[in-house]
Image (cartoon, rainbow, N blue to C red):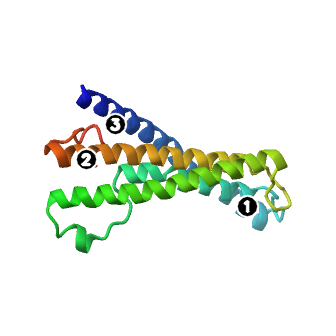
Amino acid sequence: MLYSILRCWCQAVEALVTGLGRLVAWGVPLLALVVAFEVVSRYLLNRPTVWAFDVSLFIFAYVGALGGAFAQQRKAHINVDILYLSVPPRWKHVFNLLSYLLGGFFLVIVCHLGWGKMEEAIEFDYRRQSEWAPSMIHFWVMIVAASAVFLLQLSSDFLQNLWQLMTGQPLLDDRETGGSA
């Protein structure tokens, strides 16, 4: 019963993060198009836009923040390999669990502070200090959402590592985790 519940949770989180990661990846070519448009407008047509810089900053922030959980899922974040690769698999799981707890602590703080900034942005109509002056509400909503999704991914990773440490068996196989288990 516990195995089924944990497995279902991890599969749902893996599917959510994979879908979000693939969706956010479309921001990279969109960012390139915005920057290319601004270059053409500014240097070829001598008519710079007031919005392209702000839009490119927002797209970059979205890709970076919302892509963090996907990078975590794919084990693409940095690691202290000199130590990590020299220990047995059981110790790797212990290191992972400790790093997930530390990362989760940090993300809870980011989520909490982001929520407060989101409320302020709504109440005081925060705007970016630029000529175009777009609203900042969406940015703080994205920070809260990104940290929450990253926390979900860390919960899945934590449960998978804890299960493997306790039972010696993987909770999900490589196909279910994108080959990153």
For the point 24% across and 72% down, the residue is: 83
Rendered-image quadrant of the N terminus: top left
Residue at mark 1 to residue at mark 2: CA–CA distance = 44 Å
Measured as percent of width and height from the top left, residue 49 is found at 81, 58
Residues 37 and 109: in front is 109
Measured as percent of width and height from the top left, residue 166 is found at 18, 45
CB within 8 Å, label 2 to label 3: no
Q: Quadrant of residue 156?
A: top left
Farthest residue to the top: give it. Answer: 1
Residues 42 and 177: in front is 177
Mark sitting earlier along the chain (1/3) = 3
Residue at mark 2 to residue at mark 3: CA–CA distance = 12 Å
- Residue that mark 2 sits on: 162
Looking at the image, residue 165 sits to the left or right of residue 78; the answer is left
Mark sitting earlier along the chain (1/2) = 1
- Residue that mark 1 sits on: 53
Asked if one can make out residue 134 in the rendered structure from this viewpoint, the answer is yes
- Residue that mark 3 sits on: 10
Residue at mark 1 to residue at mark 3: CA–CA distance = 38 Å
For the point 32% across and 48% down, the residue is: 158
